[in-house]
Amino acid sequence: MLKSLFSGVSGMKGNQTKMDVIGNNIANSNTTAFKSGRVTFKDMLNQTLEGANEKSTTRGGTNPKQVGIGVSVSSIDTIMKQGALQPTGRDTDLAIEGNGFFIISDAEGYDVRYTRDGSFTLDKDGNLITSTGLYVQGILLDKATPVNMLTKTAFPADLSNLSLKPIKIQPQYTPTVSIGGFDIKVGPGLQDYKFILGKVDKTASTTATVNTTDKVITLEGNFEEGKVSPSDLATQINSALAGKIDETVMVTGSPNKNALSGEQTEKINVADYIPAVKVGGFEFSVGNELIGWKFKIGKKDDNTSTTAIVDKVNKIITIDGDFDNTTTQGMVQASDLEAKINAQLKTDGITTTIKVKGTALEGTLSGETTEEIKENLLKLVSFGIEKDGTIKGIYGDKAVVIGKVMLANFTNAAGLEKAGDNSFKKTANSGNPQVGYAGSNGYGSVNQGALEMSNVDLANEFTDMIIASRAFQANSRTITTSDEMIQELINLKR
């Protein structure tokens, strides 16, 4: 008699759990990228009243006689079915169409989570973050990576040793090359060069070597313990450049403790991002030492020889040349002007070089000057995220590849643990995350300006609610009926 009481209780408890899950599903029917849950049941311990008997010569076999003592929850599953995509028109909203999760983490990389909720935003520094402040992870290229510099090798094919970084969309675009945590401002003299990391362990002292044949500058230092200062690194680089390349660099930042030997920048394409000023029909691409300077037209009449005068006190370079096309001598040429200016800069102890292009403009006036040369701080106009996760920014009139938003897949995504804030954490049964590129090898594509909606099916939830409610009622009737039967048993004594 008592078994039916406990069976009824277990049924009520089980269906209460089912109602809890249904209630949570309905409550999150408008939650971005929410994944609904379901409850399945299993029968509990069965009491065997009589075991099975094998047939004999006179009787057939008999089946076991068992009485179950209730029900228990077998599983609470997360349904990872894709939700519908809802356009929002917001640049920082992202939705995954297909498999995969965005990777989010705190600044130190300890609290790593995974989410389908792409309702991201930008903070004041340009970091792409979640509503709770976690950083969206991906591959971040050098800040100076114009679209026409992008090669097939810019994003690695082998992702086994990939080090993810927080995605940062700079509010302004500066002429720098980034490596090992440092930003190195370069000038025209380093056209077609690239930086590479040599030794980065505790045994390495801060050094820089220049290979002018291969156009490679190798940096070494103790990156593991962060014992490389930007000023020391700048001194080492400029010392290595001295006597080989007429250029100086400026260095900011701090060493990345996860820097790897062999890490390298893309080839430097100076024309794409070095500050350039125009005067007299010519365009002058200048190095860092000439920030704050001006170019000025001096003599410009017929038969004026091409010369350059450098005034270090007033920071003015005065150009003399034939800007009048009425003689047979010919107008001043860009190549001749470049040679004369660089020779005079070197004579005056200025190590930077300039590049000159263009054609002399007839009608140029003596005394005409450029605006003061400033750092090329181009402001962010807009940015876009393509279906493969590639982030491109438009700074002024320059298109720049910033990086890629990376996705993670799991062998058993349903095995992830819900961690709150629309995020999941890996578990022993989910498998380790497999990081890859969106739109390839089983990874879904990224849709900008959209969000994934909840996958809760309200019609199904209300149907399950009716079933759970009736089952709960039926189990309660089991208890009351069993109670009445016990009462009748007690009443036999009367």
Image (cartoon, rainbow, N blue to C red):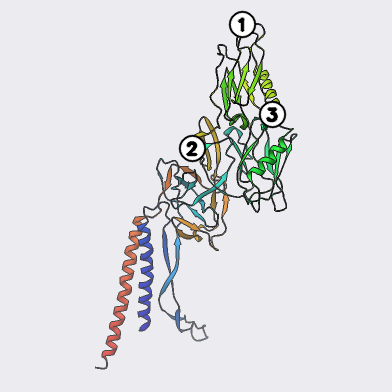
Q: How many marks?
A: 3
Closer to the camera: disc 2 or disc 1? 1
Residue 272 is situated, as x and y percent measured from the top left of the image, at 59, 30
Residue name at image x 55 percent, y 40 percent: 402
Circle nearer the N terminus (2, 1):
1
Height in image: 70 above or below 305?
below
Work out whether residue 91 or residue 327 is closer to the camera in this orientation and state it: 327
Which residue does the numbered mark 3 point to in the structure image?
A: 349
Query: How far, Cα to Cα, is label 3 from label 1?
Result: 37 Å
Amino acid type, residue under disc 1 in the picture: Thr
Query: How far, Cα to Cα, is label 2 from label 1?
Result: 49 Å
Dot 3 surroundings within 10 Å: few (below 14), some, or many (20 or more)?
A: few
Which residue does the numbered mark 1 point to in the structure image?
A: 326
Work out whether residue 85 or residue 120 is closer to the camera in this orientation and state it: 120
Dot 2 surroundings within 10 Å: few (below 14), some, or many (20 or more)?
A: some
Work out whether residue 412 or residue 41 is closer to the camera in this orientation and state it: 412
Closer to the camera: disc 2 or disc 3? 3
**SS type, badge 1:** loop
